[in-house]
Amino acid sequence: MKTKMKRFAAITATLLLLCGLLAACGGGSGSGGGGGKSESGQVYFQNFKPEQDEAYQAIAAEYTKETGVPVKVITAASGTYEQSLRSEIAKKDAPTIFQINGPVGYASWKDYTADLSASEVYTHLTDKSLAITGEDGGVYGIPLTIEGYGIIVNNKIAAQYFALPGAQATSLDEITTFAKLKAVVEDMQSKASDLRIDGVFASTSLKPGEDWRWQTHLMNVPIYYEWSGEDADLSDPAATAEIKFQYSDNFKDIFDLYLNNSTIKPTVAGSKTVDDSMAEFALGKAVMVQNGNWAYGQISGVDGNTVAAEDVTFLPIYIGAPGEETQGLCIGTENFFCINKNASEADQKASLDFMNWLYTSDAGKAHVTNDLGFIAPFDTFTDADKPADPLGQQVMDWSAKSGIQNVPWNFTVFPSQQFKDNFGGYLLLYAQDQMGWSDVTSKVIADWAAEKAAAA
Amino acid sequence: MQKSLTKYFPAFVLPTLAAFSIAFLVPFVMGIVLSFSDFTIVTDARFNGFDNYVRAFTDPSSNFVYALGFTALFTVVSIITVNILAFLLAMLLTRGLKGTNLFRGVFFVPNLIGGIVLGYVWNTILNAILSNFDLTLMYSANLGFWGLIIVNSWQMIGYMMIIYIAGIQNIPGDLKEAAAIDGANKRQTLFRITLPLVMPSITICTFLTLTNSFKLFDQNLALTGGGPSNMTEMLALNIYHTFYGRNGWSGPGQAKAVVFFALVGVIALIQLRITRSKEVEN
């Protein structure tokens, strides 16, 4: 009797296991057919930016009210997008719209992205080179917004400095090279007490997870000069498989400038967050901070903010590269939307219709500009649809300036988060005087090659 | 009775068995299968033998072996600090002092706070102290290590203390009385009477400290995030970073997770066996 029971239990267990495995495997391949409950399809948008969740929920409700098409928006918690997308997309009711951060994101999700070259929203894209294209020439990701970053300057304090006797410049317009920037910053730092500031640059946040302004954004500039010198074709993986880090010394120069003319000593940079830096800037303790237009909300939202909207302005990040007099801000995006090609036809169409509505209808456009705060790179947007915040407006102005070469966001092809985190770690050790710059350079070059090879 | 029990056995066991299979067995087996595969999405994997395990251990950027050493050291130090301090507190709070209950509550409370919150709170506290010396927790792996020890001890001591208190209160009063009559001094009572009789508590406390310290994740993530430069990265955080932070490393990340499981299992079993043999029946 006992053996019979045991055998029965064993068989049940095995069967259950098999069922589970089959069900799990079936989820991936069989998602083409079922799923669509309503005939007209439904939209499931997996959103990347937690701060925009509320806006998207309101947009989704409005769209559903207007058209009757159900729209579900799910937002992953900050920093967990990849992991939640990985689990969501394996499900039967997978997201129909998801986001990727650029060519690297496309490389890991290319089995799931539908070709969007025939879509209406793509025809409205002002600069077609912004879209993510595959090796076959198809369009697989369309940017939701463009963003720009540089050195944000508090004009009011800067003007006070320029009025001082012996100032190294008379206005910000004179700063068009690294040499000039360095002269101004160092002189300003020596007069910090006259200007009643703690330092020129807000603290260099090097806490792990808070170091993206350096290991990603700042690194973009030297890498841009390296690749534009080589005329590298960034859509070709072989062209970005390795770097020489040719402008490594330039990176060091500007990074030293940030560290040594700061509100804090370099040894405590490891405890500082981006929020700390932005708060210092907002409270007028610092004159400059490297960040992008998205940070305006952070500046204006600080209690006791002393910086008026008309006083914030952008300066490009000069690193001393040849020809930098005409360099502009770093303008680009790492927010692309993709349509899941494994979703049903109806769902795919419904998803495209939704994106189309968002970027071409008046109601949709109002949401994009006012609620999502996007600078939309589509020709359906006119001057009247310009963003309200001063930094967003400046990004638009810079992108239209004649004779200025803005720097694209080449960091979208940086190897991986691990590469960036490692780099941030080296920068921290360098700031604490525990690693020499030549070690940083060689480690960055080696890490780049290794992480690229692992992903290939 | 026996007969009907046999007859209805499947009906009773099936629901539990199904739940257990879905929630535990299937994912577990899938996990092991995946550790031998190259994959990005769990339902779409290609078998690639022991590649993942080789990469997990030998690739210089993997950091797994370093994290293993760091975790082992952390666990050893944690077991010592947590258990000794918890035992001392338990001794102190079983003497019938005034306010005993209040103090027991106070020491237990840290255990109720989540690890992430605790990590951030202590991050602020420790950085504030260190900033007097122009240092931060990120300055060196040493500072990060002791920071982790402080946070972990602070959190676990209260829980272990409760277990030790229960153990100490279970010791029959007549034994201590007999020892006193026979002329045993305090030290002799502690080592000959108290310690052998709270051995079951020591077993459970060492076991809990060992596995919890070895599996520490939240506090590590929130306090140091593995910094500076991954030098305070413990095993769980290393697995997390490998799996989610790198392209093409899901397989090795899964392999690390399987190794991690095996390590926790083996260590816990050995430890359990060793301490069990020291227990005294009372």
Image (spheres, coloured by chain):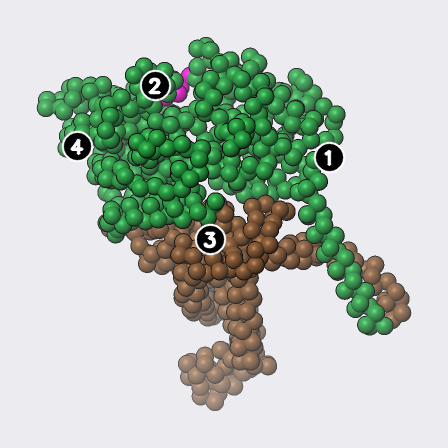
Chain colours: A green, B brown
Q: Which mark is residue A307?
A: none
Element under label 4?
Answer: helix
Q: Is residue B56 left or right of residue A410?
A: right
Residue segment shown in magenta: A388-392
Q: In front: mark 2 or mark 3?
A: 2
Q: Per the image, is A391 magenta?
A: yes
Q: Are marks 3 and 4 in contact (CB under 8 Å)?
A: no
Q: Which mark is residue A398?
A: 2
Residue denoted by label 1:
A33
Which amino acid type corresponds to the residue marked 1 in the rendered image?
Gly
Q: Are marks 2 and 3 in contact (CB under 8 Å)?
A: no
Q: Are marks 1 and 4 in contact (CB under 8 Å)?
A: no
Q: Is residue A436 above or below residue A80?
A: below
Chain at tag 3: B
Residue denoted by label 4:
A186
Chain at tag 2: A
Element under label 3?
Answer: helix
Q: Is residue B108 visible?
A: no
Which amino acid type corresponds to the residue marked 2 in the rendered image?
Trp
